[in-house]
Amino acid sequence: SVAPASWDKPLAGKVAVVTGAARGIGATIAEVFARDGATVVVADIPAAGDALSDTANKVGGTALALDVTSPDAAEKLAEFCTERFGGIDIIVHNAGITRDKLLANMDEGRWNSVINVNLAAPHRITEGLVARGALKEGGRVIDVSSIAGIAGNRGQTNYGASKAGVIGMVDAEAPKLAEKGITINAVAPGFIETAMTAAIPLGTREAGRLMSSLLQGGQTVDVAETIAYFASPASNAVSGNVVRVCGQSLI
Ligand code: NAI
């Protein structure tokens, strides 16, 4: 039978963490989660400063200065959320960076920093939260991949590898997390209008827009609403999936 959930506030009573939430897609995820009734923890690097507290204030949430690549990120997050809220129900690994360069100039620093933020950190934090029992039964892990991890993109060997890695990670972690009653899914956005894509040269940006399944750049809310589905009771039995949002692979 259909559960009598409150579809007005499907995330009521849930504690949701969003990394990289000071701006862009992460800030909109925080907004949508708050609309849906969640208690939201918005996390971002200390350098995000006022932008982070502004997002927290806007959504009535709590700000946490957290570099996802720091070795104690999981411990810090677990302690913060357990002391204040009794644990975590939903975590969105949204923090991400690009350090684009054509292959010949793809130095190790660029490679390592992108792999660390986009791929190693989500894995380390998920593992660390589960090991500490901070992620509750019925919990949700939501990763952010990219169409660049499916189709590949010139100058983005590091970024594409990290985002393809996220897809492999979701596949591998799903059965393990299922033992704890936790689901894991990912979104793979196409071209979304944010500060990250504003930095792309105009011609490449236009090409990115045209590769979208909607033939135009997507908005942060398009990604946030799909993530809200993965967080909601509507997706109780959905795990190990990757959903493209505003993006299609042309190859
Ligand atoms: P953005 O650059 O506007 O925001 C990213 C946020 O992550 C920033 O607030 C930044 O301070 C934070 N961040 C960076 N390193 C961090 C760290 N070590 N610890 C904690 N926070 C950190 O980017 P945007 O566009 O909002 O992207 C969000 C996610 O969506 C990223 O994972 C990105 O790769 C992914 N994505 C974006 C697409 C787009 O077209 N904008 C397309 C596909 C995926």
Image (spheres, rainbow, N blue to C red):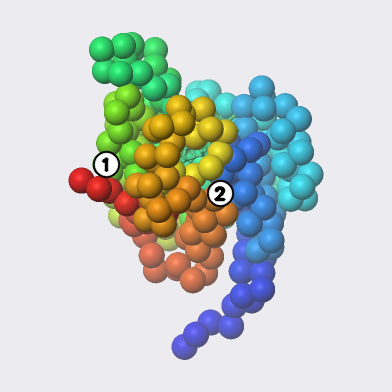
Q: Is mark 2 within 8 Å of ligand 1?
A: yes
Q: Which residue is mark 2?
A: 220
Q: Which residue is mark 1?
A: 151
Q: Is residue 227 visible?
A: yes
Q: Quadrant of residue 244?
A: bottom left
| Three-letter amino acid code of the residue under disc 2 | Thr
Q: Is residue 194 left or right of residue 213?
A: right
Q: CA distance from mark 2 to mark 1?
A: 21 Å
Q: Is residue 2 above or below residue 11?
A: below
Instruction: Describe the element under mark 2 as helix, strand or loop.
Output: helix
Q: Is residue 87 above or below residue 11?
A: above
Instruction: Describe the element under mark 1 as helix, strand or loop.
Output: loop
Q: Position of residue 76 (x, y in %)?
A: 61, 32
Q: Is mark 1 within 8 Å of ligand 1?
A: no
| Three-letter amino acid code of the residue under disc 1 | Ala
Residue at 44% from the left image edge and 36% from the top image edge: 205
Q: Is residue 237 left or right of residue 231?
A: left
Q: Quadrant of residue 27?
A: top right
- Looking at this view, is 99 or 193 the one in front? 193
- Looking at this view, is 215 or 125 the one in front? 215
Residue at 41% from the left image edge and 32% from the top image edge: 203
Q: Is residue 12 above or below residue 170?
A: below
Q: Position of residue 245 (x, y in %)?
A: 42, 54
Q: Quadrant of residue 155?
A: top left
Q: Is residue 138 visible?
A: no
